[in-house]
Amino acid sequence: MIKLPEDFITEIKDVLGGDAEKYLALSDSEPFKGISINRLKAEPEKLPALLGFDTEKSPFYADGCYIKGDVQGIGKHPLHHAGAFYVQEPSASSAVTLLDVHPGEKILDLCAAPGGKSAQIASCLRGRGMLWSNEVVKNRAQILLSNYERMGIANGVVSSCYPEILCEKLSGFFDKVLVDAPCSGEGMFRKNPEAAAEWSREHVISCAERQLAILDSASQAVKDGGTLVYSTCTFSHEENEGVITAFLEKHKDFEHCEAAEKFGRKTGVSCGIRITPLEGGEGHFAAKLRKKGSSYPTLRTSQKENNDKTLISVRTELSNIFTELPAGKLTVINGKAYIIPSEMPEINGAGVIRAGVFAGELKKNRFEPAHALFMASKPENIKRVLDLSLNDSRIQEYLSGCEIDCETDSGYTAVAVEGIVTGFGKCSVGRLKNKYPKGLRTL
């Protein structure tokens, strides 16, 4: 049973008014669970039938679903390994819906780890434009990168940089910026009772101060006429309406965008929506702002490829495996090959961990392709594909690191499940040597 702090109960009564008692009555009920389908990998119309558990459409995101019933071990599902979906609390997807992403746009997800909202944004971009995902905490940035690779994001950048530094360097570069700010986590109480035990009024106030500072930095990165969405997974006025009001008082070049979505409840600011368990989500606040004026980014973007001998050799090796590579600039740095997004700006000191896709590396005069490159590629663009059904025992053997029988010609071969690339191996004489990364394997 969750023990809610008395100060929080007082706060929630102020926030929800007459609905507070209904909310409190739900505090010990089961939390909502959900997934967001990744269009880079799967078709939303077909995927639910393959999952093996019941789902229901979410009101917060067009490609989001509730997980119905008690479903265990979803992270071990082959289609999860394949990046076909991201496990995400349903209301958490609402912020990207407000962001209203379209293919071809340049988007910054400033506080991105572990990567759920970045995965949504990438799915909405459909491989066009560019996504920049930042996480200041290094080990969390590595988790973000791992999710990037699993979801097959090719037109993206992962960085670990302080927001004030990154946004100054990328001033006016992005069409849209998302700030999913660190918060007191009141919307996590049902999912994580420890969050309730750690809650305090002092933490709420300190979070609001930090959130406003991050939002101040983020404003620099938005181009004139662009969109800034601020979100939290908490309920408090201080961290939500209070931060938006303080920001708008300080930044006269920003204005409200009326929240027209048909979910959530109204808030103390017209640009915002609030979701509680009463509206079918654990807890989220999101507000949409517009930067006045109109302008275009002035940063230079990535230049054309340099055709040196090493690059030509790598390109030849890749042509033996792939019929088409993800879009971008192929480059080789210290024996490692990358495909860098064509929209990548030419800047230094931004804490970039990975730009685009790690394609592979030269090892003792031979080239070995990378897991990330296969994950970012479609089966039709790969010369040899072993496509397994969910009921084929070989898919579980492959995910656990075993060699498996292989019917393709010899050479590097993609392994797919239900037509979705999950990894690769090297086929020889009817057997596939497993190349699935050890850190991702099932036990």
Image (cartoon, rainbow, N blue to C red):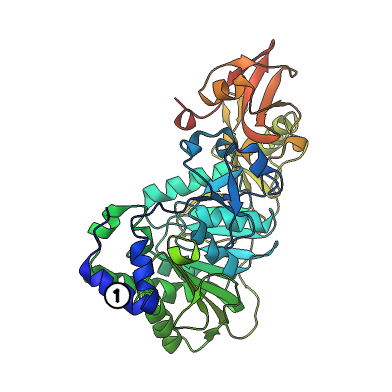
From the viewer's side, name the closer residue of 232 and 28. 28
Counting every numbered tag in the picture gives: 1
Give the residue displayed 40% in from the left and 51% down from the top: 30
Q: State the image coordinates of residue 347 (x, y, percent, origin top left).
A: 53, 61
Q: Is residue 302 visible?
A: no
Relative placement, left or right, of 400 versus 173 is left
Nearer to me, 184 or 266: 266
Looking at the image, residue 162 lies above or below residue 13 = above
Residue ID for mark 1: 11
**Quadrant containing the C terminus in the rendered view:** top left
> Which quadrant holds residue 223?
bottom right
Q: Position of residue 106 (x, y in %)?
A: 62, 64
How would you rate the neighbour count of disc 1 (Cα within 10 Å): few for under 14, some for 14-19, many for 20 or more?
some
Which residue appears at 58% of the width and 82% of the height? 258
Pick the front one: 180 or 48: 48
Q: Residue at x 43, y 50 (%)?
A: 141
Q: Give coordinates of residue 97: x percent, y percent.
A: 59, 65
Type of amino acid under label 1: Glu
Where, by quadrant of the figure, is residue 79 drawn? top right
